[in-house]
Amino acid sequence: MTQALAAGAAQRERKHATNPHGSDVSMTTTVPAIPLVAPSRMPRAAKAGLALLGIALGAVPAATAQRADPDPHMAPIAQYLIPDRSAEIALARSAAPAAISRDATIMVLGRAGFEPAVEGSNGFVCLVERSWDSPFDSPGFWNARIRGPACYNPAAARSVLPVIYARTRLALAGQSRDQILDSIRAAFAAHALPSPAPGSMSYMLSKLQRIGDQAVRWLPHLMFELPRTADGDWGANLSGSPILLHQDTLNPITTEFLIPVGRWSDGTPAPSH
């Protein structure tokens, strides 16, 4: 979800960074009622969020759950995958300092959705986000080059990751961007997906992040997820404020605040912007 904030930051103050962003069929809103991860393979730290998602995926009728063909703007699925599983695990862990990520649950992307790779013990969940977690109006929504390592704290793992898992599963099932948006909105309306829990946040400190073609090694930053909130409540986007905010106008559910920090996850200094 950082892609949205990168765009907002660039609009607010160009010294921060270059802006990383530069379906047409009306169908009944649907969510495919199919599981994301086989329960026998599910790490304990991921179960709470995926359990909520299972409710969400079954809460909306599935009359048109899966398209015969993927969105024409979507690249072949193989381009979104990282063939080397160990490399994806390492990339996911690079989102946060080792003191956090070494004991975190790690999820990797498979052809049907995120799959557990390592079971953690500290409640954090780390993964590499893909382009469909961009704002719904982003030109980079299907950009197969996007890689966004992120580590979510326990509150966010329970209440924010279910949305990311759902968007991923719907994208890989062949839904168009508009269908994914309609499905997510319907799940929220049915109270089948949670709003961000108090204290939800994530680390995005990887120097290997690519959140847009013009945003490679963008800003190491912390993200804070809240139910829809006015930017003035945090003093975001004001001159001299370190807090950035971009509201995705097509997604009225969640607000994401971003706070840049001065070091990458390995402790080395990050360039100033």
Image (cartoon, grey):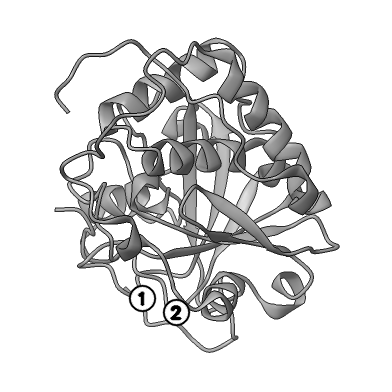
Residue that appears at 51% across and 36% down: 166
The circle drawn on residue 144 is none
Q: CA distance from mark 1 to mark 2?
A: 5 Å
Q: Is residue 215 above or below residue 13?
A: below
Q: Are marks 1 and 2 in contact (CB under 8 Å)?
A: yes
Work out whether residue 16 or residue 111 is closer to the camera in this orientation and state it: 111
Q: Position of residue 175 (x, y in %)?
A: 32, 32
Task: In this rendered view, identify the residue nearer to me: 147 or 166.
Answer: 166
**Picture residue at 61% right of the left edge, 27% below the top:** 195
Other-residue count near label 1 (Cα within 10 Å), few / some / many at <14 / 14–19 / ≥20: some
Q: Please, what is the three-letter code of the amino acid marked with disc 1? A: Arg
Name the residue furthest bottom: 268
Is 166 located above or below residue 97 in the figure? above
User: What percent of the width, then of the height, locates residue 197?
Assistant: 69, 33
Q: Quadrant of residue 199?
A: top right
Residue 39, visible in the rendered structure:
yes
Kindly identify which residue carries mark 2.
Answer: 207
Residue 232 percent coordinates (x, y): 44, 32
In front: 228, or 156? Answer: 156
Residue type, label 2: Lys
Find numbered disc 1 in the image and state the secondary structure of the residue it sits on: loop
Q: Which residue carries the number 1 mark?
A: 217
Left or right relative to 232: residue 156? right
Q: Quadrant of residue 24?
A: top left
Total marks placed: 2
Task: Give left or right: position of 19 versus 220.
Answer: left
* Quadrant where the image shows the C terminus: bottom left
Q: Is residue 237 visible?
A: no
On screen, residue 123 above or below 33: below
